[in-house]
Image (spheres, helix red, strand yellow):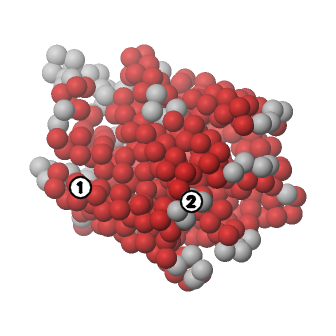
Amino acid sequence: MITIPYWRLSGFYFFYFATVGSFIPYWSLYLKHIGFNADAIGELSALLISTKIISPNLWGWIADRTGRGLRIIRIASFFAGLLFAGFLFFHGYWWFAAITLSFSFFWNAALPQFEAVTLQHVKTEPHRYSRIRLWGSVGFIVAVLGVGRLLDKLGIDNLPIVVVSILALMWLVSLIIPDAKRATINHANSVGMMHILKKPEVIAFLLVSLLVQLAHSPYYVFYSVYLKHYQYSASETGLLWTCGVLAEIVLFIYMKPLLKRISLRRLLLSSVLLSVIRWLLIAHYADNLAILITAQLLHAATFGGTHVAAMHLIYNYFGEQHQGKGQAIYTSLSFGLGGMLGSLYAGYYWESLGAEFVYLIAALCCSVALLISYLWVGRENSGRSE
C-alpha cells in the first residue's frame, strides 16, 4: 500500500497560499500607499502574471524531461523568496518592475509542478487531492486575517517583510517532501503532446480556463481597492476575502461525495454559471455587505469548483507522461495569459470607465466561457470522477 505524505504535501500548500493571502489582498493597497496610480498597479500586476506564460512551460518541460519536478520546486521556492526581498531595498517603478519579473519567474514555476507531484502521490486515491489542497485555503485564511490585523496595527509598510518570511517557510517545507514514484511509461504506445493539444475538447477547456481567470483578475488586483473606496477597513477587507476561502474549504471537504453524484462536466458548467452571477453582484452591490458576503461565498464555485474540475480534466487529458507539461500549459494560458490580460484591462479602465464596467466585462467573459463549456467540454466523457 502506498503511503501518501499528507501533512508534508498539505504544509507546502498551506505556506504557498499563505503567501498568496498575504500578497494578493494587500499588494495593490501597498502599491497605492507608496504612490503608484491605477495604471501602474495594473501594469505591475500584469508583469507579475505575465511570467506564467513562459515560466511554467519551461520548468514543466524540464520536469518531464528529467523527472526532477521536486528539485525544481525547491529551487523555485528558494529564489522566489530571495528575489522578493529586493522590494525591501529598492524603490521606484522600474525597480519594482524588474523585481516583479524576476521573482515571479520562479514563483510561478512552483505551483504547477507541485500540483503534478501531488497528483502523482494520490494517483491511487485521487479523491484525496481535495483534502490535501484545502490546507492551501486554510493558509490563505490564516494569512488574510492575520496580516489584515497586523497591517491595521503596524502599517502597510511592513507587508514585504511578512511576505518574505512566509516564502522562507514555504521553501523549508519543500525540503522535507518526498518524491513520488513515477510509473514506467511505454513510449511506444504513448500519445504525443501535439496530438492531445489538437483535440477540440482540450482546446475548448483551455479557452474556458483562460476566460475564467481573465474574469478573476479584477478581483485579485483591485477588490481590496474597491472595498476601500466604500470605506471598508483592512480587517473587514480580510474578513470578506476569508468568507470566500471558507466556502472554498467546505467545497473541498465535500468534494468526494459531490463527485460521486455529478460529473466533471456538470461541476464545471455550474461553477462557471455561478461565476457570472458573482461578478454581477460585485459590480452592482458593493455598498451592501450582505450581498457582498453572498458573492464571496460563491468563490467556492468560481475558484474551488473550476479548479477541482480542471485538475481532474488535466490528469485525464494529459496522462502521467505529460502531466508536468499539461499543468504548465493550463497555468500559462489561464493564470498567465488570462490573468495578464485581465490585469491590464482592469488597470486601464478602472478609473476611466469605473469598477462597475470592469466587473461587467468579467461577467461577460464567464458567459462566453459557459457557452463554450456547454458546447464542447465533457460531452464525450461526462462520467463521474472516481
- Asked if residue 50 lies left or right of residue 83, the reply is left
Query: Mark 1: which amino acid?
Result: Ser
> Cα distance, mark 2 to mark 1?
32 Å
- Give above or below for 366 relative to 109: below
Secondary structure of the residue carrying numbered label 1: helix
Say few, some or many: other residues with alpha carbon within 10 Å of mark 2 (under 14 / 14 to 19 / 20 or more).
few
Q: Residue at x 37, y 46 (%)?
A: 210
Whole-percent x, y for residue 116 in the image:
42, 35
- Identify the residue position indicated by label 1 in the image: 373
- Sequence order check, earlier mark of 2 and 1: 2
> Which residue sits at x=48%, y=61%?
358
**Side (left or right) of 291 relative to 304:** right
Q: Nearer the viewer, residue 195 or 341?
A: 341
Q: Residue at x 57, y 37 (%)?
A: 47
Q: Residue furthest right?
A: 154
Residue type at the position of mark 2: Ser
Give me the disc on residue 352.
2
Foreground residue among 76 and 43: 43
Tell me the quarter of the picture where residue 101 sits. Answer: top right
**Which residue: 43% across, 40% down?**
337
Task: Please identify the quarter of the rendering in which residue 306 is found.
Answer: bottom left
